[in-house]
Amino acid sequence: MTKDEERLLMQQLIDPKSQRQAFERLVREYSEQLYWQVRRTVLSHEDANDILQNVFLKAWSHLDDFHHDAKISTWLYRIAVNESLDFLRRKKNQVVVSADDSGQSVSQTLMADRYFDGDQTEALLQEAISRLPEVQRLVFNLRYFDEMKYSDISALLQTSEGALKASYHIAVKKISEFFRSHD
């Protein structure tokens, strides 16, 4: 979305007459990329869909709180990240990220998921990512999969670019070590 399109969308979101249509456009525009961001964090298709619904419900109910000096995408990503992390914290006792109730690894669980369309290497990558600490996992996903600039991640997570670069570098190193140990 160009800056002009985003500016127009923001104006339409403010105006009660065009708000509903503008929000529908916002959902169409950002659903897929937000889905994949959430999915990479929680891994499960069903959980990602539920969280994505919560993201848009929260965005709709907090339109008045949106700071119009920020980018819409940054605001939505922040909601998605927070919803995903809240979900993981609630599920922490069930160890959703590292294994399910049957003791399967993340890669085994993904390969059994009918919505997973990757191969064994992709499943192993997700296994490696799932073993990262929360912040490193988040930074890695945003940078690697979403190709987000450090400046945008910095605005999203409200931390310095230097800290993000360090987190990404450490995450890449840990993932590389994971693959070396699985040769």
Image (cartoon, grey):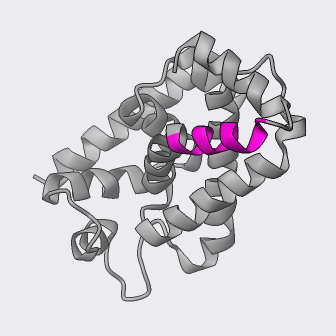
Residue 156 is inside the magenta segment: no
| Residue sticking out furthest to the bottom | 102
Q: Is residue 159 in sight in this rendering?
A: no
| Residue sticking out furthest to the top | 4
From the viewer's side, name the closer residue of 161 and 68. 68
| Residue sticking out furthest to the front | 17
Q: Position of residue 86 (x, y in %)?
A: 70, 60
Q: Residue at x 34, y 34 (%)?
A: 173
Q: Quadrant of residue 119?
A: bottom left
Q: Residue at x 68, y 60 (%)?
A: 54
In the drawing, does residue 130 fall left or right of residue 175? Answer: right
Q: Residue at x 84, y 30 (%)?
A: 14
| Residue sticking out furthest to the right | 64
In the drawing, does residue 25 fall left or right of residue 172? Answer: right
Q: How many marks?
A: 0
Task: Relative to 3, say whether 6 is above or below.
Answer: below
From the viewer's side, name the closer residue of 183 and 127. 127
Q: Position of residue 67 (x, y in %)?
A: 84, 26
Q: Is residue 79 in sight in this rendering?
A: yes
From the viewer's side, name the closer residue of 17 and 53. 17
Q: In the rendered structure, which segment of residues is drawn in magenta?
A: 18-28
The secondary structure that most of the magenta stretch takes on is helix
Q: Quadrant of residue 140?
A: top left
From the viewer's side, name the closer residue of 166 and 121. 121
Q: Position of residue 177 (x, y in %)?
A: 27, 42
Q: Position of residue 29 (x, y in %)?
A: 51, 37
Residue 25 is inside the magenta segment: yes
Task: Relative to 116, say whether 141 is above or below.
Answer: above
Q: Residue at x 42, y 66 (%)?
A: 45
In the drawing, does residue 39 fall left or right of residue 117? Answer: right
